[in-house]
Amino acid sequence: MGEADEKSIRVMVVDDHPMWRDAVERDLAEAGLTVVAVAANGREALARFPAARPDVLVLDLQIPEPNGVEVTAEVVRQDAAVRVLILSASGEHDDVLAAVKAGATGYLVKSASRTELLDAVRRVAAGDTVFTPGLAGLVLGEYRRLAEPGHDDDSPTLTDRETEVLRLVAKGLSYKQIAERLVVSHRTVQNHVQNTLRKLQLHNRVELTRYAIEQGLDEEL
């Protein structure tokens, strides 16, 4: 992602701790991203979200009502294109899964570094799913556990390469990382993902990841 693209990333920050909120806002602005709004609680977030129109919502879970999970579900309902990156002090199993199921595309704990935060914002803006190390495995394991034991015989057939790409998507790799591993172009990876989305009648990478997990495709290659 080029410098011009980064400047066009619109970010909204929601956290009830003023010093933390200000620090995140400052880090984003200094990195060249555009902070379009901030909020201290769920009500403010939902009130300001429609006018702010952020590409990425950086959101704490433990905020005054409605909480972060409820805010995530509502903003995704309003705008399916928005990317929600949870930035929380909690790395608890239930909190992570609740956020992902509500529609979050990333989850970082607040011990993450400034560099990790900025990288996560850029990656979720580009369509990737991003998790603090260790949390990705938790989410993958849970979706695998909840997967139905059997699947329709009419399930669409994917090519070997599409299945390979899907496995790597399920593991949380970025398109760039997948392209490097398979020694193909970034555009080729995008094309495989788009073809797979169309075949599976899914709409975005998050749904695709969930499908891959349910099919057990996150297992080691």
Image: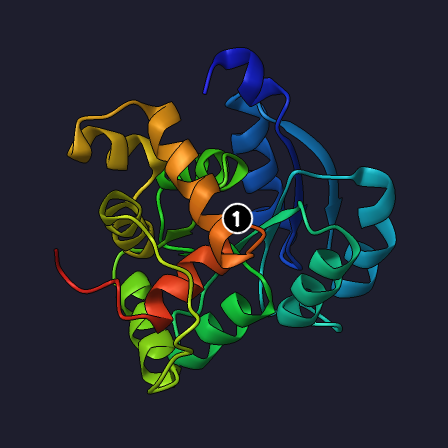
Residue 50 lies, in percent from the top left, at 85, 46
Which quadrant does the C terminus fall into? bottom left
Report the residue marked by disc 1.
198
Colour convention of the picture: rainbow
Residue drawn at x 35%, y 35% as measured from the top left:
175
Residue drawn at x 44%, y 71% as measured from the top left:
154
In the rendered view, does 199 fall on the left or right side of 165? right
Name above or below for residue 91 compared with residue 50: below
Residue 38 lies, in percent from the top left, at 73, 44
Res 114 quadrant in image: top left
Residue drawn at x 69%, y 57% as measured from the top left:
76
Dot 1 amino acid type: Arg
In the rendered view, does 192 fall on the left or right side of 183? right
Residue drawn at x 81%, y 58% as measured from the top left:
46
The answer to which of 68 and 89 lies nearer the viewer is 68
In the rendered view, does 211 fall on the left or right side of 62? left
Whether residue 115 is visible here, answered yes or no, is no
Q: Residue furthest left?
A: 221
The answer to which of 143 and 86 lies nearer the viewer is 143
Name above or below for residue 2 compared with residue 16: above
Residue 158 lies, in percent from the top left, at 33, 53
Q: Secondary structure at mark 1?
A: helix
Q: Residue furthest front?
A: 154
Residue 100 lies, in percent from the top left, at 50, 66
Name above or below for residue 74 compared with residue 169: below
The answer to which of 213 and 127 lies nearer the viewer is 213
The answer to which of 38 and 81 lies nearer the viewer is 81
Which quadrant does the N terminus fall into? top left
Task: Answer few, some or many: residues within 10 Å of disc 1's Cα (few below 14, many 20 plus, some between 14 and 19).
Answer: few
Whether residue 90 is visible here, answered yes or no, is yes
